[in-house]
Image: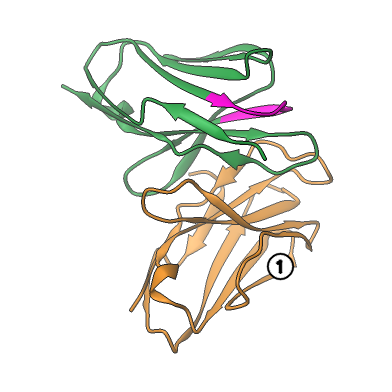
Chain colours: A orange, B green
């Protein structure tokens, strides 16, 4: 248990569906992250939120839409995805405020787009 | 752009062997993070260091800032150490950049 939870753990969706991934951290951190891990590729940073404000969007297509209602919760809304978006999506948190500290990861959501 | 390389890509060892995994990077950094990813996908932080050496149980991490290189050592390896080990580095004011990982299998 890392103190970061993600739901669902597995998701299969069609290209026309809309779904959301949820992340929650119980560590009192102020920074939260979405990462994408495709097969045989390194982790890719997608979004960073610091004190609920988005501070980084790493050229992610608009079919991925993040939402951070408070420092403990992070969502990734998905719509009209492509098969190449199939991957493991990982959420992480750390102390924020300009100092990017040690990251704590959730278990990930394995997404398959059919 | 900071490039992070790891070697070897894959490593198979017998139980009890001493294991070394290497990480090299291309720009000056303020911190380096060693992570462990098990087959289910979950990632666990092992160490975060900016200089010298850290030890936790059978794991030792070292970093040489001048040479832009870090090593992760596992002593008395065990099958439960089988995982992907990932090195990530952070330049000042930047987010972490992740290496490709080293897949370790420890055979009983």
Magenta run includes residue B15: no
Q: Chain of mark 1?
A: A
Quick one: A26 or A11, which is closer to the camera?
A11
Q: Position of residue B9 (x, y in %)?
A: 35, 31
Magenta run includes residue B28: yes
Locate the N terminus of chain B by quadrant. top right
Q: Residue furthest right?
A: A97
Q: Helix, strand, or loop for circle 1?
A: strand
- Do we see residue A8 in this rendering? yes
Q: Which residues are magenta?
A: B24-33
In the displayed structure image, the side of residue A8 where residue B11 appears, left or right: left
Q: Residue furthest left?
A: B108
Q: Position of residue A55 (x, y in %)?
A: 78, 58
Q: Which residue is mark 1?
A: A68
Q: Measured along the vertical axis of the image, is residue A26 above or below residue A84?
A: above
Q: Quadrant of residue A82?
A: bottom left
Q: Position of residue B37 (x, y in %)?
A: 41, 40
Q: Position of residue B97 (x, y in %)?
A: 61, 41
In the displayed structure image, the side of residue B5 where residue B102 appears, left or right: left
In the displayed structure image, the side of residue B83 where residue B28 appears, left or right: right
Q: Residues within 10 Å of mark 1 (few under 14, many from 20)?
A: some
Q: Measured along the vertical axis of the image, is residue A56 above or below residue A17?
A: above
Q: Quadrant of residue A99?
A: top right
Residue at 30%, 16% (x, y): give it. B77
Q: Measured along the vertical axis of the image, is residue A68 above or below residue B66?
A: below
- Do we see residue A110 in this rendering? no
Q: Measured along the vertical axis of the image, is residue B77 above or below residue A109?
A: above
Residue at 59%, 70% (x, y): give it. A76
Quick one: A72 or B104, which is closer to the camera?
B104
Q: Quadrant of residue A88?
A: bottom left
Residue at 74%, 27% (x, y): give it. B30
């Amino acid at each position: 248990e890392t103190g970061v939870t993600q739901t669902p753990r597995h998701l299969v969706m069609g290209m026309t569906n809309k779904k959301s991934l949820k992340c929650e951290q119980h560590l009192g951190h102020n920074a939260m992250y979405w990462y994408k891990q495709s097969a045989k590729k390194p982790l890719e940073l997608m979004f960073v939120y610091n004190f609920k404000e988005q501070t980084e969007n790493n050229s992610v297509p608009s079919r991925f839409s993040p939402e951070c209602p408070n420092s403990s919760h992070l969502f990734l809304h998905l719509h009209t995805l492509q098969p190449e978006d199939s991957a493991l999506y990982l959420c992480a948190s750390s102390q924020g405020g300009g100092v990017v500290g040690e990251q704590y990861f959730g278990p990930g959501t394995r997404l398959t787009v059919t | 752009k900071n490039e992070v390389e790891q070697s070897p890509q894959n490593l198979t060892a017998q139980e009890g062997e001493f294991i070394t995994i290497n990480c090299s990077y291309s720009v000056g950094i303020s911190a380096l993070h060693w992570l462990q990813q098990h087959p289910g996908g979950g990632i666990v932080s092992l160490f975060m260091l900016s200089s010298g050496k850290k030890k936790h149980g059978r794991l030792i991490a070292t970093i040489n800032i001048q040479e832009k290189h870090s090593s992760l050592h596992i002593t008395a390896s065990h099958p439960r150490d089988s995982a992907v080990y990932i090195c990530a580095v952070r330049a000042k004011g930047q987010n972490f950049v992740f290496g490709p990982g080293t897949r370790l299998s420890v055979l009983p």
